[in-house]
Image (spheres, rainbow, N blue to C red):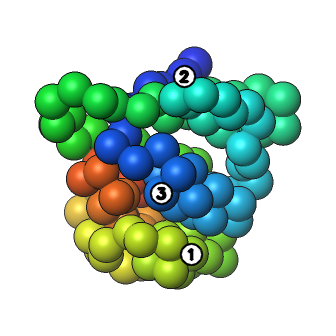
Amino acid sequence: MYDHIGLRVADLDAATRFYAAVLAPLGYVLCSSGDGYAGFGPKGEPALWLHLNTGRKADGAHIAFRAGNHDAVKAFHSEGLKSGGRDNGGAGPRKDYSPTYYAAFLIDPDGNNVEAVCT
């Protein structure tokens, strides 16, 4: 659970395309965008903010998004690979986390580790 997260990105258009694709199967949409930013979340409630970073390269972050079911986790991973993400662990159980933990991991275009998880 989180209130909001902000990520600095080098290419706002590429990052927006990536997150629009991977978050759609989880039920999230692009809620707000403008010069140098984009906000995603449930309709009308942006909670993930992308900000154009024109300074030094930012260190990668880790974000985990809650998914409703295993199919949504699979779609998150598939859409991410089609949208410029790199595989960091395909959809499947992660019994070392918990007996019911099912997740997929991607590296986004800016080097952030993004995850979809269903428990």
Vertical arrangement, residue 65 with respect to residue 80, above or below: above
- Residue beneath disc 2: 4
- Residue beneath disc 1: 79
Q: Amino acid at mark 1?
A: Glu
Q: State which mark lies toward you, 3 or 1.
A: 3
- SS for callout 3: helix
Q: Quadrant of residue 27?
A: bottom right
Q: Earlier in the sequence, mark 3 or mark 1?
A: 3
Mark 2 is surrounded, within 10 Å at the Cα level, by few (under 14), some (14 to 19) or many (20 or more) other residues, namely few
* Label 3, label 1: how far apart the Cα atoms are: 14 Å
Left or right relative to 58: residue 112: right
Q: Earlier in the sequence, mark 2 or mark 1?
A: 2
Vertical arrangement, residue 47 with respect to residue 104, above or below: above
Specify whether residue 34 is in view: yes
Q: Verify CB contact (< 8 Å) between mark 2 and mark 1.
A: no
* Label 2, label 1: how far apart the Cα atoms are: 23 Å
- SS for callout 1: helix
Q: Quadrant of residue 85?
A: bottom left
At a point 20% along the width and 34% down the height, the residue shown is 58
Q: Earlier in the sequence, mark 3 or mark 2?
A: 2
Vertical arrangement, residue 85 with respect to residue 24, above or below: below
Measured as percent of width and height from the top left, residue 116 is found at 49, 58
Measured as percent of width and height from the top left, residue 49 is found at 54, 30
Q: Verify CB contact (< 8 Å) between mark 3 and mark 1.
A: no
Q: Amino acid at mark 2?
A: His
Q: Verify CB contact (< 8 Å) between mark 3 and mark 2.
A: no
Residue that lies at the very extreme toward the top in this rendered image:
3
Q: Amino acid at mark 3?
A: Ala
Mark 3 is surrounded, within 10 Å at the Cα level, by few (under 14), some (14 to 19) or many (20 or more) other residues, namely some
Give residue 14's mark: 3
